[in-house]
């Protein structure tokens, strides 16, 4: 029988709320995940929550009840997963968003080092230096998952700390693809050294690039590096880049949203690679 909690002052509830803060997340090494789609993708990818809070009162339609019941049964079948039933006020206190399907859980950190990234014979990596907005990182994860990127690396420095991959809004914006795309977090100097040791060329997007991104050869192994929303790329990356490219701009706008710009470059790699091989026959398109 699942445990039931009804008090807003319960320490378990307060623990979840504290995880909205990165310092608390890092200390506890736990992340908050919300939503049926996110939970399903996490389970399908082999990840298991430690604790799950469910709120059956938010399941209104027959379809919602059926989907939620199936996921609940799947979770309760996991002997190591603790399931706790909470009321709507408690769920609202813990949740980052209103529409999360009545599922919220605590997952251990997805700790991966650079050496844990599974690289294909022609590695395709996306690197974001100092990305500040969790929504952009989540959107980039979705694009990376759709395009078959080998891995996403968040790199940082003292001047460009950026957000972290375990931010609840990253998980939310990624629709759970944070569990499907291999990723790592490391300091800028460490990432550059790691790429050099593996012979992976670096292609940097910069307004000062001499060639349009469509004219740069991205067909082999490649690491695309993008800078932060506010400061762009550091000198360390610009000096390390084997190729510098620019996304042409016209009119009065001089920059694109980070996730949009990254998506353009990701699919340019896909386009160039498809010129030399047949595309997958899945027949799926973005809806």
Image (cartoon, helix red, strand yellow):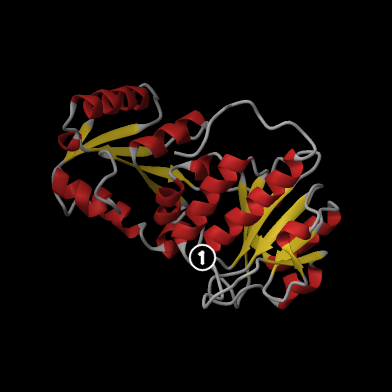
**Most foreground residue, 73 or 25:** 73
Q: Going 21% across and 54% down the picture, which residue do you hit?
A: 93
Q: Secondary structure at mark 1?
A: loop
Question: Where 238 falls versus 178 (above or below)?
Answer: below
Question: Where 283 falls versus 229 (above or below)?
Answer: above
**Most foreground residue, 172 or 258:** 258
Residue 97 in the image, given as x and y percentages of width and height: 28, 52
Residue 241 in the image, given as x and y percentages of width and height: 79, 66
Q: Residues within 10 Å of mark 1 (few under 14, many from 20)?
A: few
Q: Going 43% across and 62% down the picture, which residue do you hit?
A: 22
Residue 230 visible in image: yes
Q: Going 61% across and 55% down the picture, which residue do you hit?
A: 264
Question: Where 175 falls versus 203 (above or below)?
Answer: above
Residue 110 visible in image: no
Query: Quarter holding the N terminus?
Result: top left
Residue 194 in the image, given as x and y percentages of width and height: 78, 57
- Report whether 92 appears left or right of 208: left
- Report whether 102 appears left or right of 162: left
Quadrant for residue 243, please give it: bottom right
- Report whether 48 appears left or right of 90: right
Query: Quarter holding the C terminus?
Result: top left
Residue 164 in the image, given as x and y percentages of width and height: 51, 60
Quadrant for residue 215, please give it: bottom right
- Report whether 104 appears left or right of 249: left
Q: Going 55% across and 65% down the picture, which residue do you hit?
A: 131
Quadrant for residue 40, please give it: top left
Residue that protrudes farthest toward the front in the picture: 251
Q: Which residue is mark 1?
A: 257
**Most foreground residue, 94 or 66:** 66
Question: Where 33 falls versus 196 (above or below)?
Answer: above
């Amino acid at each position: 029988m699942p445990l039931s909690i009804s008090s807003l002052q319960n320490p378990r509830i307060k623990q979840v709320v504290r995880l909205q803060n990165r310092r608390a997340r890092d200390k506890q090494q736990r992340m908050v995940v919300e939503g049926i789609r996110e939970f399903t993708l996490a389970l399908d990818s082999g990840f298991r929550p430690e604790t799950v809070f469910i709120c059956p009162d938010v399941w209104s339609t027959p379809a919602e009840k059926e989907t939620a019941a199936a996921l609940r049964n799947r979770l309760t079948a996991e002997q190591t997963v603790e399931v706790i039933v909470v009321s709507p006020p408690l769920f609202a206190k813990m949740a980052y968003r209103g529409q999360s399907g009545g599922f919220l859980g605590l997952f251990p950190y997805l700790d991966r080092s650079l050496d844990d990234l599974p690289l294909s014979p022609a590695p395709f990596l996306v690197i974001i230096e100092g990305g500040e907005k969790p929504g952009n990182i989540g959107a980039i994860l979705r694009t990376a998952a759709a395009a078959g990127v080998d891995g996403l690396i968040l790199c940082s420095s003292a001047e460009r700390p950026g957000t972290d991959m375990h931010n609840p809004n990253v998980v939310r914006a990624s629709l759970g693809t944070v569990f499907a795309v291999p990723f790592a977090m490391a300091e800028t100097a460490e990432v550059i050294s790691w790429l050099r040791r593996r012979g992976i060329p670096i292609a940097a997007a910069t307004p000062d690039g001499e060639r349009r991104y469509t004219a740069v050869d991205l067909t082999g192994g490649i690491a695309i590096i993008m800078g932060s929303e506010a400061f762009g790329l550091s000198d360390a990356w610009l000096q390390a880049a084997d190729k510098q490219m620019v996304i042409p701009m016209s009119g009065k706008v001089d920059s694109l949203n980070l996730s949009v710009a990254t998506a353009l470059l990701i699919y340019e790699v896909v386009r160039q690679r498809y010129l030399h091989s047949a595309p997958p026959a899945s027949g799926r398109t973005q809806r």
